[in-house]
DNA sequence: CGATTGACGTACG
DNA sequence: TCGTACGCCAATC
């Protein structure tokens, strides 16, 4: 009953040049990102691993590039690197928005780094019971 | 179809 | 312990 996004299926719809028509690995990433509870954070590698492509953590971040403007709010600010560093903050608009959102959820951020990242870390594979 | 990129991660020095 | 190099997979040009 869990695992809303497991299989790495990529229907790859035709055309797909318009926003909102992303039917691919990206959509899986968005789905998992939206599953991140408020006040929690996860890493690209964790999502990638959950999707089955543990070694493609870069793809997760790459997919997040399309997360901006998505109709369903994709909490990309909850997805950070393995070091707990807000590496993608520069991609936000403004870049400081990422830290602001995290703090708004009760997450402390110091020097672009999540405090107690180890405690706030939310593993989809573990939490969703992969 | 081939080459390049990428919000990472791990290995090696 | 810190810095640098390589690899991974999918998307984009």
Image (cartoon, coloured by chain):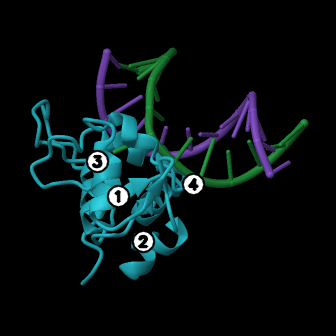
Chain colours: A cyan, B green, C purple
Compared with A81, B3 (above or below) is above
| Chain of the residue displaying label 4 | A
Tag 3 secondary structure: helix
Q: Is residue A85 left or right of residue A38?
A: right
The dot on residue A69 is none
Label 3 marks a residue whose chain is A
Residue drawn at point x = 42 percent, y = 71 percent: A122
N-term-proximal mark, 3 vs 4: 3
Mark 2 or 1, nearer chain start: 1
Q: Is residue A9 above or below residue B13?
A: below
User: CA gap, disc 1 to disc 3?
Assistant: 16 Å
Q: Determine contact: label 3, label 2, CB under 8 Å.
A: no
The crowd level at tag 2 (other Cα within 10 Å; few <14, some 14-19, many 20+) is many
Pointer 4 or 2: first along the chain: 4
x%, y% of residue A82? 55, 56
Left or right placement of residue A62 versus residue A58 in this view: left
Mark 2, secondary structure of its residue: loop
- For mark 3, what is the residue? A26
Residue A106 in sight in this render: yes
Mark 2 lies on residue: A122
* Residue at screen point 54% across, 70% down: A118
Dot placed on the residue nearer the N-terminal end, 4 or 1: 1
* Label 1 sits on residue: A78
Q: Quadrant of residue C3?
A: top right
Same subunit: marks 4 and 2: yes
Density class for disc 4 (Cα within 10 Å; few <14, some 14-19, many ≥20) is: few
Chain hosting mark 1: A
The answer to whether mark 2 and mark 1 are in CB contact below 8 A is yes
Return the residue at label 4. Answer: A83
């Amino acid at each position: 009953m869990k695992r809303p996004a497991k299989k790495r299926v990529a229907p790859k719809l035709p055309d797909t040049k318009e926003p909102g028509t992303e039917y691919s690995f990206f959509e899986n990433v968005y789905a998992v990102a939206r599953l991140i509870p408020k006040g929690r954070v996860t890493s690209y590698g964790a999502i990638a691993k959950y999707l089955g492509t543990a070694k493609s953590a870069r793809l997760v971040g790459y997919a997040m590039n399309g997360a901006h403007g998505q109709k369903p709010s994709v909490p990309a600010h909850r997805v950070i690197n393995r070091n707990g560093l807000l590496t993608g903050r520069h991609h936000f608009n403004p870049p400081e928005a990422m830290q602001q959102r995290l703090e708004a959820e009760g997450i402390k951020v110091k020097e672009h780094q999540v405090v107690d990242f180890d405690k706030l870390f939310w593993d989809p594979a573990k939490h969703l019971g992969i």
